[in-house]
Amino acid sequence: MQNSIVLITDNQKIAQQTLKKIVLLRNSDNFEVLPYENCFDEIKKRKSILVLYHLKPEEKESEKFLNLLQKLKQTKELQSSSVCLMYEEIDENMLCNAFEKGLTDFLDINATDSEYTIRTIWCLQKREKLFETEKNKDILSQLKIVDKNNYVYTENYTYTILKEESKKNWGTFAVVAPDINIRSKISPQMLMNIIKKNVRTSDILGYATDFKIYLWFRETDKKNVLKVLEKIKLSLSLDFTISAGYIETKNIAFDKAEEYANNALSKALLKGNCFLYAKEPKEKEVDLELNVKNFKLQKQNFVKKLESILSPLFYQIQKRNEEKLFETTINQSVEKEKSIFTLENEKGKSVFSVSYPGYAKITIEIMHDIKDSELKAEKLFLDTEEFSEQKIEYLLNSFIKDFKNYTKC
């Protein structure tokens, strides 16, 4: 079966000139001339791999072409087809709009034979690469490595991909999330689609837990990333706001960059509609060793760290679950001696507490006191080296999940 290349025009003179100028180098290509009327249906019938479109220098013709281009790019079997615009007079604004909608190339009708041939071959080559890319995306989506709707990395693979990418080169890592009060109004997929329109094809995007989206900007400094984040914000309606934490990864392992960026995001979410750059902590701010001589100072410093992590985390998880847990009261408090997160409804009460007595390990106590059921209690111990926001967040989410199961809410 031959590949279909079509020229859309009603001008027979231009059709003949184009046929003479384009030298087809492959026997597998078939060249046809189609009229403007019903051209989309004819292109779709032939599954054309290259569409050359003669733009008439008349009013409203540009609008017709843009509408056709949009239909072609929204049709699955034609998405990888190349489209080359042939013009007599060109409107630069229209040309920019066309490229945003997926135009491959453009060509002056009076161009030389060589330029016709070269640009045609270039369009065919680009189509082959795009077709191969789309095929690979389909395979990756079937393996659930990328999301089938927008082809960004899924939650299970985002971390691994970004960690490997960070080993190859430096960049800026960003964590973006919708503000807590609007999470019921915007889905992660909707936010991802908006972000994807405002970044480069070379930037890496992926889903993470709890409405978070991870972005990797290769060899891009923090100033330019902030410009991209501001651009994304402007693309959102006034009802939707986002926050972000971001950090350059020069001389920083990805695990640390992820931790710093997530901590910056937590602080940004408390303010709302905020982008915070995550500075790498100074050496003296790193967790103190357990064998420090001054016990009081060591405990005081670690308790401050606990408060700085638990306070925003408890608040975020409370806000995130208030709309999901119907007729359930959620309370949380962060104190020096003990921090407590409680869930209570007519069926029972569950308590999640975190305490740190000093040199001993961090103690996490979980208690589910549910009516018509035996009391379920659990006590966990964490070394200070094991303690992290991600660890506590995981345990607290599991605690909430258990409460839902026990109370059937």
Image (spheres, grey):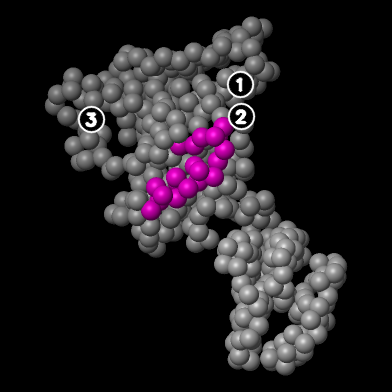
* Residue at the spot 38% in from the left edge and 16% down from the top edge: 334
* Residue at the spot 22% in from the left edge and 32% down from the top edge: 288
Residue nearest the observer in this picture, 328 or 230 = 230
Within 10 Å of the Cα at label 2, are there few (<14), some (14-19), or many (20+) other Cα atoms?
Answer: few
Q: Which residue is mark 2?
A: 184
Q: Which residue is mark 1?
A: 323
Q: Can residue 74 be seen in the rendering of this structure?
A: yes
Question: Viewer-nearest of labels 2 and 3?
Answer: 2
Task: Identify residue type, mark 2.
Answer: Ser
**Label 3: which secondary element:** loop
Q: Which residue is mark 3?
A: 290
Q: Are the residues flagged by discs 2 and 3 in contact, CB closer than 8 Å?
A: no
Residue nearest the observer in this picture, 5 or 116 = 116
Q: Can residue 69 be seen in the rendering of this structure?
A: no
**Label 2: which secondary element:** loop
Q: Is residue 317 left or right of residue 111?
A: left
Residue 192 position in % (x across, y down): 57, 46
Toward the front, the furthest residue is 59
Task: Identify residue type, mark 1.
Answer: Glu
Q: Is residue 234 left or right of residue 67?
A: left
Residue 79 position in % (x across, y down): 71, 64
Residue 326 position in % (x across, y down): 64, 16
* Residue at the spot 29% in from the left edge and 54% down from the top edge: 251
Question: In the rendered picture of this protein, how many numbered marks are placed on residues?
Answer: 3
Quarter residue 280 falls in = top left
Name the disc covering residue 341, or none.
none
Residue nearest the observer in this picture, 73 or 335 = 73
**Where's the C terminus, which quadrant?**
top right
* Residue at the spot 14% in from the left edge and 24% down from the top edge: 294
- Magenta part of the protein: which range? 224-243
Cα–Cα span, label 2 and label 3 = 43 Å
Asked if the magenta segment contains residue 167, the reply would be: no
